[in-house]
Amino acid sequence: MPPEATPSFNLVRRPWIPVVRIDGRVDDLSILGVLEQAADLRQIIGDVPTQVFAIQRILLAILHRAWNGPESIADWTHRREHWDDSLDEVRDYLDAFKDRFDLRHPRTPFFQVAGLHTAKDEHSGLEKLIADVPNGQPFFTTRIGRGLERISWPEAARWLIHVHAFDPSGIRSGVVGDPRVKGGKGYPLGPGWSGQIGGVSLVGADVRETLLLNLLVPQECEMPSSGHDLPPWERPAVGVEVEGADSRPPTGHLDLYTWQTRRVRLVGDDNGVVGLVLAQGDRATPQNRQALEPMCAWRFSEPQTKKFGTPTYMPLKHNPERAFWRGLAALLPEVATPEASGEPARRLQPGVLKWVAALRYADVLDDEAVVRVRATGMAYGSNESVVDEIVDDLLSLPIALLRADDSRLRTVAVEAVEQADKAVLALANLAGNLQAATGAGDVDGPRDRAREVAYAGLDAPFRTWVLSLRQDEDPLEASARWQQLVRAIVWSLSRELIGATGPAGWIGREVRNRHVDTSQSDAWFRGQLGAALPRGFVEQKGKIA
């Protein structure tokens, strides 16, 4: 009898990445298949949006290492123009490390620890691998029951990468050999690295362009370039223990793209995966990683600065209750440079957006280019131990907004968000005052509903307006155009609120030692709206419209 073949599922050659082709067909491809057919693929898809972010970072790490760069914009341009020829180096690279991409390798399984086990040799169910949204409920209800008994190796590969990137915090299995285990438990060390940031990436017309746009040259983004920045498949295979007292510091962006926050062993057979051993891995601390993590904006933290005694920045996470455009200021170069005030910058732009601006300065992209920016992230609850929501939003921006040498349009765009916020606040105040005038109950509910409706009404108009901005446009005219849009939308909503007010509101009542009625509430609203939108009221034939 022939000897039994060694179990294998190699990600380089076996299909596991879901894609949408240019013609709309959905398919599964291997790592090499995605890279070889990238120009014919519209996008990579996944079981959840955060999966796509994590998988793309794996592909970027492969390209960076296979090409040993790109070392310059000229090198990057050469790769773009000779993509197919450049794949020869990628094939050679993947062939050299092919064993490290095998999910079922007996000694070095991809992103796992061979032989990982608990004292009782138990494993967890698949609910520990598959993202829960929200609050412990499986993201897909079809997973309940038999849907959680077994999954295929291709799907397990996607969730394995995802669990390292986005696994919530919390107690994990205590595994034999981990000195941090106490009482058979691995105590919390925080979510996966990608779960600690507000992911920002660039989106191209096809997968080839998407990968290239995110394939940055570190020195063009104020990032160090280190030959020691290696992904895990180029390092010695990890064991149960971590380096140092708790973990080693990251060495660069490739290290963070592939950071192993957990120690994992998938449990399965030729028919698929039935469970896993999931333990604590390398802790990733977020303070001042802005020089290493380019796919995130950063915020200055006063508490962390006081704690560490040095200016400290933290990842700017996405708020699932706010559309991506409302945080526009964090995506753009600062309007006022920190040197001018002597104070630390309040926000730091994502490295990938500095990179695309560098491509514009080098005339690789022209002034009419549109930059599509995707926000990807997870919002956690209950001490970051459960997933509340997944953030996935796309914003298209004219590349002119990313120019650090011209702040006029940037100022208009950032102020446009502030003007929208002030106008919405005026509407929320109106809703609260109208509720108070009737004495019908708590004012917070009407205020919140007014905000929600107003931002929903402004969402599409803002995206259209900001995309229309051009380098040669008069900033004052662009601002006036936006303010008039906001005024029309918010004014219409205010008339609806007032129209729904009953007789009690017109009579009014005493609230905190002042009389509040519908008429007075409207007067206050008009004043606040006018202050928020000074160019929003258009003169027509001698009167204000």
Image: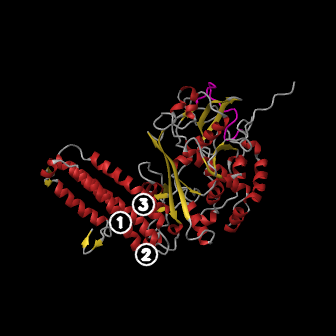
Which comes before the other along the chain, label 3 or label 1?
Answer: 3
Local crowd size for mark 1, using a 10 Å CA cut-off: few (<14), some (14–19), many (≥20)? many
Q: Is residue 24 magenta?
A: no
In the rendering, which numbered label is found on residue 462? Answer: 3
Q: Nearer the viewer, residue 24 or 127?
A: 24
Q: Is residue 251 visible?
A: no
82 on left or right of 465? right
Residue 381 lies, with reference to residue 373, above or below; the image says above
Instruction: Report which quarter residue 206 is drawn in.
Output: bottom right
Residue drawn where x is 55% and y is 69% of the image: 368
Q: Give the magenta part as a residue range.
A: 109-125
Q: Secondary structure at mark 1?
A: helix
Spot occupied by residue 41 in the image (x, y as percentages of width and height): 65, 51
Question: If the image is split into quadrants, where does the N terminus sit?
Answer: top right
Q: Earlier in the sequence, mark 2 or mark 1?
A: 2
Horizontally, residue 94 falls left or right of residue 313, namely: right
Kindly identify which residue carries mark 2: 474
Foreground: 459 or 306? 459
Q: Amino acid at mark 2?
A: Asp
**Discs 3, 2 touching: Cβ within 8 Å:** no
Q: Is residue 22 above or below residue 80?
A: above
User: Which label number is shown at residue 456?
Assistant: none
The residue nearer to you, when weighing 390 against 306, is 390
The overriding secondary structure of the stretch rendered in magenta is loop
Residue 459 is situated, as x and y percent measured from the top left of the image, at: 41, 56
Task: Please tell me whether residue 349 is drawn above or below residue 317 in the rendered image.
Answer: below
State the residue position of label 1.
Answer: 483
